[in-house]
Amino acid sequence: MDTEVSRSATVPAPEILNQLNTYMYQVAVLRAALELEVWAKVAAGQDSADRLSAAEHWDLLGTRMLLDDLCALKLLAKEGDRYQLVPEAEHYLLPDKAAYF
């Protein structure tokens, strides 16, 4: 029993792994949105999950989840059921801009 207590006392915290997992998730969301040109589509008027999923033939739930994740990352803003570009997205995430990421 003493061995169990001493082992549990020396177990390292998984904080660095949790952080890396979070970073990987954030990068995956960013990459998917870049590949799908989400910001250009929102700027062009496909500014709700319903409109975007219908126009692109995407799954509605998946579309909503992606857009909401972008809001959580502060790469989109949401008011009601409408999404809009944040200044950083307008400057860096539209393919026709000189500073496109």
Image (cartoon, grey):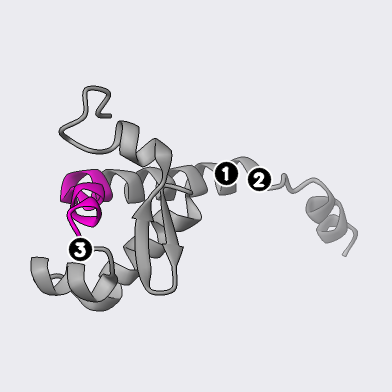
SS class, disc 3:
loop
Magenta residues, start to end: 32-45
Identify residue for label 1.
19
Q: Real-space Cα distance between discs 1 and 2?
A: 6 Å
Task: Say which residue appears at 24% left-offset and 28% top-offset.
Answer: 100
Dominant secondary structure of the magenta stretch?
A: helix
Identify residue for label 3.
46
Give the label, 1 or 3, closer to the camera.
3
Question: Foreground: 90 or 38?
Answer: 90
Tell me the amino acid under the disc marked 2: Glu
Tell me the amino acid under the disc marked 3: Gln
Q: Is residue 29 left or right of residue 40?
A: right
Q: Residues within 10 Å of mark 3 (few under 14, many from 20)?
A: many
Q: Position of residue 43 (x, y in %)?
A: 23, 51
Residue 15 is labelled as 2
Q: Are marks 1 and 2 in contact (CB under 8 Å)?
A: yes
Using the image, determine if residue 31 lies above or below residue 64. above
Q: Is residue 8 left or right of residue 31?
A: right
Q: Real-space Cα distance between discs 3 and 2?
A: 39 Å
- Residue 96 is a magenta residue: no
Number of labelled discs?
3
